[in-house]
Amino acid sequence: MSYAIIRTGGKQFPVTEGQTLRVPTIDAEAGKKVDIETLVVGEGKDAKFGSATLKATVVGHGKGDKVIVFKKKRRKQYKRKQGHRQGYTEIKIEKI
């Protein structure tokens, strides 16, 4: 089983072939193939470090769960409530 660590959207994710995962939004349409930068490929003594690419397919886009931002200053009659839903792209790892 192939193993890799990828970097996308300023975050790092461990992945294997055939895995589906949610990453920060990628500007690509559903069904398109994208190349993603890898940091490490392989496991144990067979691990190779450095920049390579792997193939992934965009499954779809969506928004995550709502996060509530609530600000309050006690005794000052100050309250602010705001909600936020972070966008994501769901990808399927095709080939490492």
Image (spheres, rainbow, N blue to C red):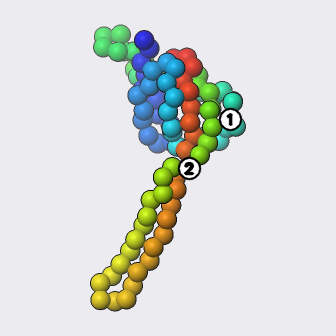
Q: Residue at x 69, y 30 (%)?
A: 31
Is there any visible trace of residue 39 in the rendered image?
no
Vertical position of residue 75 compared to residue 95: above or below: below
Depth check, front residue: 62 or 28? 62
For this view, does 42 lie left or right of residue 22? left
Question: What's the amino acid at mark 2?
Answer: Lys
| Label 2, residues with CA under 10 Å away: few <14, some 14-19, many ≥20 | few
Q: Residue at x 35, y 78 (%)?
A: 72
Question: Which disc number belongs to residue 30?
Answer: 1
Depth check, front residue: 60 or 29? 60
Q: Residue at x 62, y 32 (%)?
A: 58
| Image x and y of residue 54, in percent | 55, 22
Question: What's the amino acid at mark 1?
Answer: Ala
For this view, does 39 lie left or right of residue 94? left
Is there any visible trace of residue 73 in the rendered image?
yes
Q: Secondary structure at mark 1?
A: loop
Count of numbered marks: 2
Q: Residue at x 44, y 14 (%)?
A: 2
Q: Quadrant of the N terminus?
A: top left
For this view, does 5 lie left or right of residue 64? left
Report the residue marked by disc 2.
63
Vertical position of residue 95 compared to residue 72: above or below: above
